Image (cartoon, helix red, strand yellow):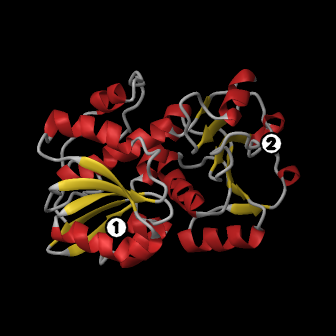
Amino acid sequence: MSTGRRPSGIVARTPPGALVILGQPVAQSLSPLFQNAALQASHPGVHYARREVAADDLDRVLAECRAANCGGNVTMPHKFAVCERASNRTETATRTGAVNTFWWEDGALFGHNTDVDGIVATVRALCPDGVRGDVVVLGAGGAAASVLVALESARRAGAGRTIVLARAPGRATALIARVAVDARVAANAGDIAWPRVGLVINATPVGMTPGDAVPLSTEWLSAHAAVFDLVYKREGTRWVQEARARGLLAEDGLRMLVEQGASAFETWFGVAAPRAEMWRALGEPMPPDLSVRR
């Protein structure tokens, strides 16, 4: 692949002629809203659409995308399936085992994972001077894999430990081995020295639906801990609201969503994403500390 302005050098040799997000469900996705605003500002001939895709239809839809040089994004439950089907995967996609950004080169499917970039941006915004203390990652699924990879870039050398808190310790151990990171497993919240924890990241689905319980009681957290919930909601998730009520720094997944989309845009087109337009399309002010340190 050709070298672009991003340090990873991941830029599509052939920019897509159309863009789509594939998933099931996908109607709730905000990606078309801010991606079409970005496209209107810089690539007005390209349109970004939603497409609901059942698992049995994935191969057919990908074939249609290939024929039309249509790239795009992938959301649940297809991130792992598209990763398996990609002829060429970036190192980030391979390590996480998931593709959320794809394009075509000479008819071959290329897959990348920009969720990692979105996580890095949010961690650096929450902890601009670096994470002070340990980081606790809640969950041991696909989202946790992206978090573990992102923490390698977002954290400074010599920082505290990474701890994966999961109900299935064996699954967490396997995840750490597969992603090849330095982390340890905790099966219970009581096994963690919470005064040493500087950041807690929710990588579970808890909080996605109304009435969900919080993934972890904020009573465990010390006054210097920050909270990052990968789940995003307009009003903030219940967990984020509870953390802020205690005076803790906390963010939901909206910044991550926009930054992973901006990274995808830069991968497809090799130019800086118009972040101000993307945030404006969401009706949100662009956070002043949004830029990822490159």
- Residue 31: image quadrant is top left
| Percent coordinates x, y for residue 49 in the rendering | 29, 50
Instruction: Identify the residue shown where x is 55% and y is 70%.
Output: 180
Q: Which residue is mark 2?
A: 194
Residue 49 position (above or below residue 124): below
Pointer 2: residues within 10 angstroms few (<14), some, or many (20+)? some
| Residue 255 relative to residue 179: left or right | left
User: Which of labels 1 and 2 is toward the front?
Assistant: 1
Point out the image quarter for the C terminus: top left
Instruction: Identify the residue shown where x is 59% and y is 58%.
Output: 144
Q: Amino acid at mark 1?
A: Thr
- Residue 242: image quadrant is top right
| Percent coordinates x, y for residue 12 in the rendering | 20, 60
| Percent coordinates x, y for residue 21 in the rendering | 35, 55
Instruction: Identify the residue shown where x is 47% and y is 51%.
Output: 153
- Residue 184: image quadrant is bottom right
Q: Amino acid at mark 2?
A: Trp
Residue 23 in sight = yes
Q: Nearer the viewer, residue 36 or 168?
A: 36
Q: Which residue is mark 1?
A: 90
Q: Nearer the viewer, residue 241 or 118?
A: 241
Point out the image quarter for the N terminus: bottom left
Residue 38 position (above or below residue 149): above
| Residue 170 relative to residue 106: left or right | right
Q: Nearer the viewer, residue 280 or 290?
A: 280
Q: Mark 2 and mark 1 in contact (Cβ < 8 Å)?
A: no
